[in-house]
Amino acid sequence: MIKVTVDSIRSGVILALSNLFPTMDIYGEEIKQGFETPCFFVKLLTHAQDQEMNRRYKRFYSFDIHFFPAGNDYNRGAHEMAEKLYDAFRWVGIDGSRYKGTGMNHEVVDGTLHFFVDFNFHVMAEKQSDPKMKTLDQEGYLKNG
């Protein structure tokens, strides 16, 4: 199978954010108590794989990127960041390939931006060698005659 893993996609999303916002903290596992704003938290919501035909599979990765804005006007900061993220996740480079962000939408809950983005793409499983047909020996069978 093509070497696309859950960790490589998640790391690619985190790397894209860190390239765009190099001075902000980005958390990928858990948010530490007493964190400083502004910062991001990248949460992988779901991932799945469906077989389509033969060796072809489709993979689905859904993310919720939390942004905690600084200052007093949380809603404004959150919506401004959402506009930047819509542009940033149109295409993301991961391990030398480009992946298109789809299904993007956002909401602001209690002053925190929740930016949702999906990455859906095809992968091919490695070709399995088919078992070779063995020869049959017909000795021992009775013939009509």
Image: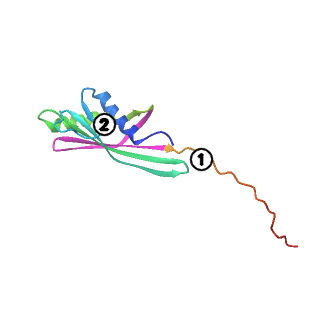
Magenta-colored segment: predominant secondary structure? strand
Q: Amino acid at mark 1?
A: Gln
Q: Which residue is mark 1?
A: 128
Q: Is residue 132 left or right of residue 87?
A: right
Q: Label 1's element?
A: loop
Label disc, if present, on residue 86 of the rendered structure = 2
Q: Residue at x 80, y 68 (%)?
A: 141
Residue farthest top in this picture: 23
Q: Which residues are magenta?
A: 97-122
Q: Position of residue 122 (x, y in %)?
A: 47, 44
Can residue 100 be seen from the camera position used here?
no
Asked if residue 98 lies in the magenta stretch, the reply is yes
Q: Residue at x 30, y 32 (%)?
A: 17
**Image height check: is 143 above or below 65?**
below
Label disc, if present, on residue 68 of the rendered structure = none
Q: Position of residue 124 (x, y in %)?
A: 52, 44
Residue farthest front in this picture: 140
Residue farthest left in this picture: 72
Q: Give the image quarter of residue 74.
A: top left
